[in-house]
Image: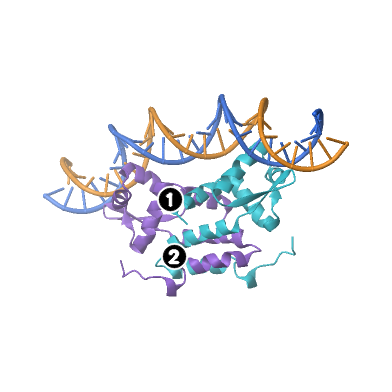
Chain colours: A purple, B cyan, C blue, D orange
DNA sequence: CCTATGATTCAACAATCATTGAAATGAGGA
DNA sequence: TCCTCATTTCAATGATTGTTGAATCATAGG
């Protein structure tokens, strides 16, 4: 991931409404959520949520698909992965032992993750 | 790491000069660099670099120490680690298999890291 | 004590970003 | 086709953020 793209992603995640949307969509999983449902969940106006969704999409954090009259957004796990990789390259380069604890604490190992019941 | 602190960190890293400073200081390692040297390296005015350093410090990305007349800044590896952990919790929660590739690619495993010659 | 150096603070200005409400687009059903 | 629902687009406004240069603070040395 290029630095410029990483900065765009960081900027996207630095805004309260947008970060809440991303976390919501990660929870929602691959099924995603319609724009209207997202707007209701994060309690902002439709036009405002649309503004933020567009920004997140541009940042590669979410991905849209049309379904009937709705537009369904879901988390872009690849984009999120790429951002983590970018951050880890900067953080860990030459200092792998320092970042190791973070990996252990991140609940990223299947054995430590509480599986959702196919939500 | 709390959401608010994470947003502050994301905001800090979303700015070109600040991200360059963080990457520079990660490269520099625990020895760190003086504010003036950082200003020269990233080619911005002393007052401007001071502004950004303060922001990065507030975001928990760097840590200062006085040394004679200079103020030496170094990367806050704990803060960076915490941010990675926060991102991974959001990204991987319920989907550990999706983030796994990022971990492998991040050059975070000692065996894949080219050790610096005590720079 | 005085001067020089390294860094920060402050106020002003410019630029970017977020929010709002009204109008427009696009898809499906009567 | 006409109507309705879901979402986006647009222009205007307010809020936040970045930059600049001058002034200030802190440390070291003569």
A98 on left or right of B91: right
Residue A29 can be seen, yes or no: yes
Q: Secondary structure at mark 2?
A: helix
User: In which quadrant of the rendered image does the N terminus of chain A lie?
Assistant: bottom right
Residue D9 vs B97, above or below: the answer is above
Query: Which is more toward the observer, A66 or A108?
Result: A108
Mark 1 or 2: in front is 2
Residue A86 can be seen, yes or no: no
The x and y percentages for residue A53 are 39, 49
- Dot 1: few (<14), some (14–19), or many (≥20) neighbours within 10 Å? many
Q: Pointer 1 indicates a residue of which chain?
A: A
Query: Which is more toward the observer, D10 or A109?
Result: A109
Q: Which residue is mark 1?
A: A56
Q: Say which mark, if any, is on residue B41.
A: none
Whether tag 1 and tag 2 are in contact, CB under 8 A, the answer is no
- Dot 2: few (<14), some (14–19), or many (≥20) neighbours within 10 Å? many
The x and y percentages for residue D11 are 38, 30
A63 on left or right of A82: left
Identify which residue is drawn at 45% across, 62% down.
Answer: B89
Q: Say which mark, if any, is on residue B92.
A: 2
In 3D space, how far apart are the residues under numbered discs 1 and 2 (Cα atoms)? 18 Å
Identify which residue is drawn at 61% across, 67% down.
Answer: A97
D12 on left or right of B79: left
């Amino acid at each position: 991931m290029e630095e410029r793209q990483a900065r765009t992603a960081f900027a996207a995640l630095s805004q309260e409404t947008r970060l809440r949307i991303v976390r919501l969509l990660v929870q929602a999983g691959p099924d995603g959520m319609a724009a209207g449902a997202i707007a209701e969940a994060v309690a902002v106006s439709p036009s405002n949520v649309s503004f933020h969704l567009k920004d997140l999409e541009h940042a590669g954090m979410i991905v849209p698909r049309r379904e009937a009259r709705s537009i369904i957004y879901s988390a872009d796990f690849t984009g999120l992965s790429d951002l983590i990789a970018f951050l880890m390259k900067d953080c860990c380069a030459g200092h792998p032992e320092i970042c190791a604890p973070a990996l252990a604490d991140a609940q990223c190992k299947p054995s430590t993750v509480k599986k959702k019941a196919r939500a």
